[in-house]
Amino acid sequence: AREDRPFYLCLRENVPLDMGWTPSHYACLASADFQDTEFPDSFDVLGKDHYGRTVLHLAAESGSMKWYDAAVRRMRRVLSEERWFLNQVDVNGESALMVACLRGHIQLVDALLDAGAHVSKLCYESVLVMQRLHTQCQKRAEMEKQL
């Protein structure tokens, strides 16, 4: 069966591989398509890799709304205060919000801001630039519709 293969055994048991990542971390970064897009119960959604990145950082890196949603759903089950999770920073001091801004993932930026992610001094400029560009894109799209 598919679940008996080593990757799926590691996934089910949350076995860390390189850099402290579990298979779920890899799947999140690669935007891999699992059928249910749910983390197994053994998966530590709060866990960090050797660089201090959470699964939310990796979702922000890849731009995957699917994995962002899965991480947030799981986080809500295990945490009473989700903002703590949303604002975790890696060894470079970057939050998931800043990573999403730097990668240009507008949908994730909006989702993180709506969820209550903190705009730190470090990422303030990135968020402003992203929102300005997003506004310009919307205005341009509206102008093109009128033509």
Image (spheres, helix red, strand yellow):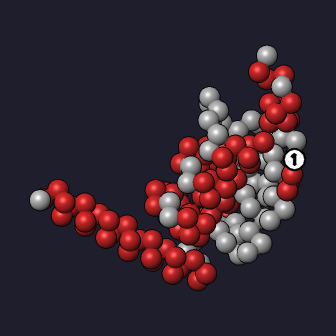
Residue drawn at 53 percent across, 48 percent down:
65
Q: State the residue lying farthest toward the top.
A: 1
Residue 20 seen: yes
Q: In this view, does 133 lie to the left or right of 11?
A: left
- The quadrant holding residue 9 is top right
Percent coordinates x, y for residue 136 in the rendering: 31, 70
Q: Nearer the viewer, residue 102 or 76?
A: 102
Residue drawn at 74 percent across, 35 percent down:
40
As drawn, 139 above or below 79:
below
Residue 73 seen: no
Q: Name the residue under label 1.
A: 17
- The quadrant holding residue 35 is top right
**Quarter the N terminus occupies:** top right
The amino acid at mark 1 is Leu
Q: Nearer the viewer, residue 53 or 74?
A: 53
**Quarter the C terminus occupies:** bottom left
- The quadrant holding residue 144 is bottom left
Q: Is residue 52 left or right of residue 30?
A: right
Percent coordinates x, y for residue 16 in the rendering: 87, 47
Q: Residues within 10 Å of mark 1 (few under 14, many from 20)?
A: few
Q: Is residue 126 left or right of residue 73?
A: left
Q: State the residue lying farthest toward the left.
A: 147
Residue drawn at 85 percent across, 56 percent down:
19
Percent coordinates x, y for residue 104 in the rendering: 50, 64
* Helix, strand or loop status at disc 1: loop
Residue drawn at 61 percent across, 81 percent down:
122
As drawn, 29 above or below 35:
below
Percent coordinates x, y for residue 106 in the rendering: 46, 61
As drawn, 5 above or below 42:
above
